[in-house]
Image: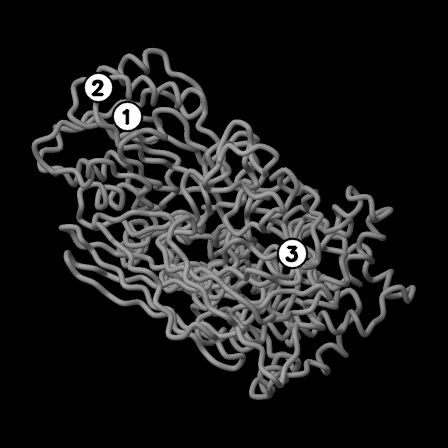
Amino acid sequence: MRFKPLATLALVAASAAAAPPSFDTLIARMTVEEKVGQLSLFAPVSAGTVGNPATRQPSAAEQRDDLRAGRITGFFNGQGLAIKREAQRIAVNESRLGIPLLFAADVIHGFRTVFPVPLAEAASWDPALAERTARAAAVEATADGFRWTFAPMVDIARDARWGRSVEGSGEDVFLGRQFAAARVRGFQGTDLAHADTMLATAKHFAAYGAAEGGLDYNTVDLSERQLREVYLPPFQAALGAGGAAVMTSFNDIAGVPSNANPWLLDTVLRGEWGFDGVVVSDYTADEELIAHGVAADARDATRLSFLAGTDISMQSGLYRDHLPALVASGEVPMVRLDDAVRRVLRIKQRLGLFDAPMRGLDGADRTDWPEHRALAREAAQRSIVMLKNDGALLPLPKAGQRIALIGPFAGAGDLLGPWTLFPGARPPVTLEDGVRAALTDPSRLTVVRGSGIDTPLRGGLSAAVAAARAADVVLLAVGEGEAMSGEARSRTDISLPAAQQALAEAVAATGKPVVVLLRNGRALALKGAVRDAPALLVTWFLGSETGHAVADVLFGDTSPSGRLPVSFPREPGQVPYYYAHPPTGRPVPASQPDSFYKARYLDSPNEALYPFGHGLGYGDVHYGPPVLSHTRLPWNGTLRVTARVTNRGTRDTTEVVQLYVRDRVASVTRPVRELKGFRQVHLPPGASESVTFTLTRHDLGFVGRDGRPTVEPGDFDVWTAPSAGEGAPASFLLELSTQHHVGQR
């Protein structure tokens, strides 16, 4: 394929050694319409609008005309190389300036090879694993021509009713920061100019996870302190790792929609943080300013969105339709338009598109990546969380027992989770296939659905009870279907559907030992026979290697090592629930849990059923008390905190040792515990290991009364524990230097 020689492209290529190229010459040659084209992103006509509301669609001929006129900066979520090749050929060869297109996609947890959903992967408590899976996803997606992903989602989610919890890393700020940075590094690699790297997008900016009532797209109203302490730090971590794109959130914050919030996008993001990358709206978020009630019409919405700092409009077409007239009228300064265009061109330059516009588009379509299946299996294994294992029911023997696999998730379907738009040709491994492959005699396995996901099956309960009675042990596969978790999948009741709960009760009534295999994309409130089963595994949506990974844990080929990234409440009515909550003025005394006129429910304890950080392995791990190097932490010094952990069991295990602190007295209320570190250690039977963490005063900071970061001297508690709900604290004093004053930053 040949391209016409273009002076502008040659100029840009020649300036690649500059840091960064100014693009002034190219911008000076552009018409206003061509500039606006660089800020307009669309789905290709052939792709439709997967996963989003329908919008007005041009014809294929109209879209080709827009390419020739330079009115499109790129496409998103269009499958196949042929479509992208042709679009790029038109953009580079037939448009006046030949500016290459950028192809984007929702590559959320894998591409052809599907890895565990992000919330599941966060349960590994291993950011390096997330970096590896993001790298593999980027390799696969770039082979299909995509160079930009709308991931990672770094929203903190503390309300399990919110369906998009599944796309993030859970409820904790510290853990969320580690995974945000790791995923950016994985997608972007060491150099965005490399052909197998993707521009990562930190989303959704900001506080999307704090939607009222856990209702997707809903309003958010919180203090600036909470915004800065909880919801913004993962974005800072993602950008600190090199992330060069940010996506706005659908929600408003205190009455101002994020897409039209100059304080958020200009003052904080660009001003305070120095961000020089691109800001893209979420799907039609600029147009939705009208429904929010802050824009009178599409023209007004365009003005508000662009002047707030949103560079690229996704799918609505508002910038294309209204931005030129706004510039002509002077309502939008030309310098603002040029700055936004320059940021987009700089991204395309960093991706090497000006030098090689067909890079990644000149290969053959590939739908299978066998070399990544082993990684998918490892990631799935390490995402599984064992909540309970009474009487050491697990691991199961591979021979001698009759096993009944019962439940709506025993077979095919509902394995991959939401946002799997590009799965490969090879189907995922089902639970049935994985268990059969692990058994010495596969004929010892009986499989019965028992119920649908949310409806009973005729004869289902009787068939399930018969299978359970004939078995030595039951594997009960229950939980959420793919359609119950993800965007626009908010739920008022985070319990199991009634049909599945009835199935669980009927199976448990047989008296046979039951191992519950939960499939879920959020924390669930477990009841009855599910809660009371002797063994309970959280298996999430694990992706391509689901069946093999679950079998590996069930039969002891690997010890479960996952830990909860979200708290599992006792009752649905406890949500939003998170471990790092502030204390109240009327706490419930541990010695008098039924005290009245205290901050307690009448019908349930306050505590989680399974706290953040909880998870068991096949060992028997015991913690010694935390040992401090000193009882005083100097203002400019360090403090070492050491935990000695011992495996008293008879099997290898992996333990996640967690470090928590609490500021006892501060100028504002502080959380009852905050995660400040964690470390994974492998412990053979009988082995002990000392795990040491280092604290400085910078680990103890917070946002003060004046809205600025601060550190205050005083007494602190510190825990080394297997979860946020366990352990006994030690204490230390952060000393005030004679050269500093209270509140020193």
Q: Which residue is mark 2?
A: 467
Mark drawn on residue 226: 3
**Separation of disc 3 and disc 1 at Cα?**
44 Å
The amino acid marked with disc number 3 is Gln
Residue 552 relative to residue 307: left or right: left
Residue 351 visible from this viewpoint: no
**Separation of disc 2 and disc 3 at Cα?**
51 Å
Q: Residues within 10 Å of mark 2 (few under 14, many from 20)?
A: many
Residue 421 relative to residue 98: left or right: left
Q: Residues within 10 Å of mark 3 (few under 14, many from 20)?
A: few
Q: Which residue is mark 1?
A: 406
x 33%, y 60%: residue: 625
The amino acid marked with disc number 1 is Ile
Q: Is residue 585 above or below residue 408?
A: below
Q: Say which of 55 and 484 sits in front.
A: 484
Q: Say which of 710 and 374 sits in front.
A: 710
Q: Earlier in the sequence, mark 2 or mark 3?
A: 3
For the view shown, which residue lies furthest in the front direction?
Answer: 591
Q: Is residue 474 above or below residue 13?
A: above
For the view shown, which residue lies furthest in the right direction?
Answer: 329
Secondary structure at badge 2 equals helix
Residue 486 relative to residue 64: left or right: left
Q: Where is residue 152 shown, x and y percent of the image? A: 51, 58
The amino acid marked with disc number 2 is Ala
Secondary structure at badge 3 equals helix
